[in-house]
Image: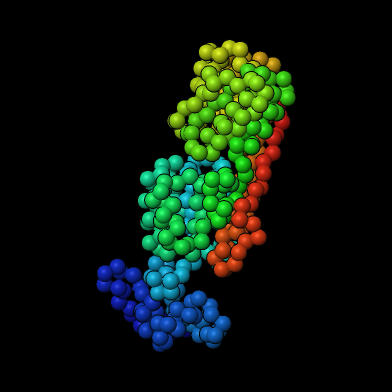
Amino acid sequence: MLSPPPPIKSHRATGRVTLSDVARAAGVSSSTVSRALRGERAVDPLLIERVTAVSRMLGYVPDPAARALASAHSNHVAILIPLLSNTLFVDLLDAAQTTLRAAGFQTLMGVTHYNESEEEQLLREQLLHRPAGLLITGLDHNPSTHKLMANSRVPCVHLMDLPTDQQADATYCVGFRQTDAGAAMTRHLFKRGRRRIAFAAAQLDPRVMQRLYGWRQALQEAGAYDPTLEWLNPAPSSLALGGLMFEQIMQQHPKVDAIFFCNDDLAQGALLAALRLGISVPSEVAIAGFNDLTGSDQMVPTLTTVRTPRARIGEAAAQMLLTLMQGEVPALTHLDLGYEIVQRESS
C-alpha cells in the first residue's frame, strides 16, 4: 500500500500542484513523472502505478499548454463551428469528438456565431495552445484567418463544404455540394408539378447562399426563374421566423405553389403557420426544408427535406485529420458524402 506523500506546497503563482511536486513526492525526476503519466512502454509498470497514485493523491492535473510548449506537440484538436443551437452542428461535433477521443485526443471547441472576426480571434486563441490539428466549418474565411491557418502549419480539415474550381486543390475537406443539393430539391418540386417555387432563407451564411444558387440554377434551366420569389432575411434561423416568412410570402405572392426553405426549422415554422392560417399543405402550397432536423418527420404534414450526413461528416473529417496528424496523406483530398432528397407529405 502506498504511504501518503509528504506535504506539498503548491505553485506560489497559481496555487496548482506541479509536475515537480509529484516528482518530489514520488522520489523520481520530473521527466520520469512525465513519461510515466504518458504511459510510455519504456517505463516500469510498477513505477507508472506509483507515479499515477501519487499524482491522484496530490490532485495533480497536467497542464496541456505547458506540455505542448515542452514537446511542440499536444493531445488536443481545435474545432470551430458556427452554432450550438442548431442540431446540425451538435451532431457533427458529437461524431467528431467521439472519433478523436477514441484515438486519445481531446477537443477544444470554439463557436464563431457566423462572425468572421470572431472566428479569427478564436483561431488565434486556440493556436496559442499549439493544437495537434484543426477542424473548421466551411471554406469561406477572411484573409487573416486563411493566413493564420497556413502559417501555423497545423493539419486542418474543413467541414460541410467542398471546394470550387477557384479554390485550392490542396485543401482537405469533407462535406457535400450545397449548390447541387439546392438544385436537386428545386427539381424535385418541379417534377411534383410546382411552377411558382419561392426560396426562403435566413442567416445567409455561405452554405445557405450556395443553396440559393442551386435553386436559381434549376429554375433558370426550366425557364421558371422569378427573382421576386427570393425571400432572404439575415436574421438567425428559427421556427418563429419561418412562420413569419410563410405569412409574408403568401400575402405578397398568393400564386406561389411551393416554398423551399433553406433550413428545416424555418420550414417547420411555416407548417405551423399554415395550420394557424388554414392553408392546406401541400394542396395549396408545398413546403420543403433542408437538413432533415429532429422533428421534421413528426410534423403535420411530415416535412419533405434534404437529408445531410452531418454525423458522417464529423466522423470522416476526424478520421482524415487523424491521418494528417500521423504525417500520412489521406486517400482523398475532398470527400463528398452526398445528400438525399426525403419525400414526405408536405410536397
| Residue drawn at (67%, 33%) of the image | 184
Q: In this rendering, would 110 be left or right of 101?
A: left
In this rendered view, identify the residue nearer to me: 6 or 90.
Answer: 90
Percent x, y of residue 282: 68, 20
Task: In the rendered view, tell whether residue 141 sits above or below residue 254.
Answer: below
Can residue 315 be seen here? The reply is no
Can residue 244 be seen here? The reply is yes
| Residue drawn at (49%, 64%) of the image | 132
Percent x, y of residue 59: 41, 71
Quarter placement of the C terminus: top right
Task: In the rendered view, tell whether residue 190 sits above or below residue 182.
Answer: above
| Residue drawn at (47%, 51%) of the image | 80
In this rendered view, identify the residue nearer to me: 215 or 307.
Answer: 215
Percent x, y of residue 103: 58, 65
Percent x, y of residue 280: 65, 16
Q: In this rendering, would 100 be left or right of 119?
A: right
In this rendered view, identify the residue nearer to me: 208 or 334.
Answer: 334
Q: Residue furthest left?
A: 12
